[in-house]
Image (cartoon, helix red, strand yellow):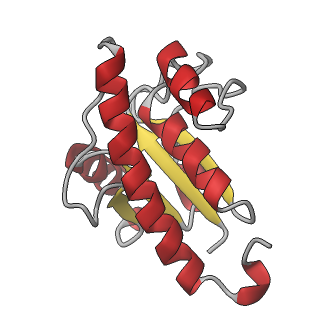
Amino acid sequence: MRSVLTVCIGNICRSPMAEGLLAAGLPGLRVFSAGTGALVGRPADATARKLMHERGVDISGHVAQQVSQLLCRQADLILVMDRDQRRYLESTYPFVRGKVFRIAEFEGHDVPDPYGKDEAAFEHALALIDAGARAWIDRILKITKPEQQPT
């Protein structure tokens, strides 16, 4: 396991927050994000940046990008926010089957989109993303070779 791609719709709220949390927990891996309908070139949403800053994770340098075949090929694991995004990726890029999962897969739910909503909606989404990221980090660390594990 060398790389993780996180995906949402616009790539300015959920996937940048997931990217930040996973990168912080897996410093030896490449973690990046994209959107199925990305607001290309835009920074992470101000509320997302604020909440992540409060957690000690800086996503201020994030720039939204569109998901692509190349990005999907570069990722060993692709984490989406909901079932629709998983279906979209699997139908658009059939080779991703078997490496696309929801970030909250182990909790059994989707992460709702907070875009355009109040801070409480962002906090709820981030709580779900955080729980999912922790579960994935634990799982990835268990299967990663000792020489690849962060020190």
Quarter of the rendering containing residue 112: top left
Residue 105 in picture, x, y percent from top left: 28, 62
Residue 95 in picture, x, y percent from top left: 42, 66
Residue found at x 40% / y 35%: 36
Looking at the figure, which quarter contains the N terminus?
bottom right
Say whether residue 18 is left or right of residue 23: left
Residue found at x 80% / y 73%: 151
Residue 89 in picture, x, y percent from top left: 35, 50
Q: Is residue 51 above or below residue 43?
A: below
**Nearer the observer, 139 or 8:** 139
Residue found at x 65% / y 62%: 26
Q: Is residue 68 above or below residue 51?
A: below
Q: Is residue 56 visible?
A: yes
Say whether residue 44 is left or right of residue 116: right
Say whether residue 16 is left or right of residue 57: left
Residue 90 in picture, x, y percent from top left: 31, 57
Say whether residue 22 is left or right of residue 86: right
Q: Is residue 103 above or below residue 8?
A: below
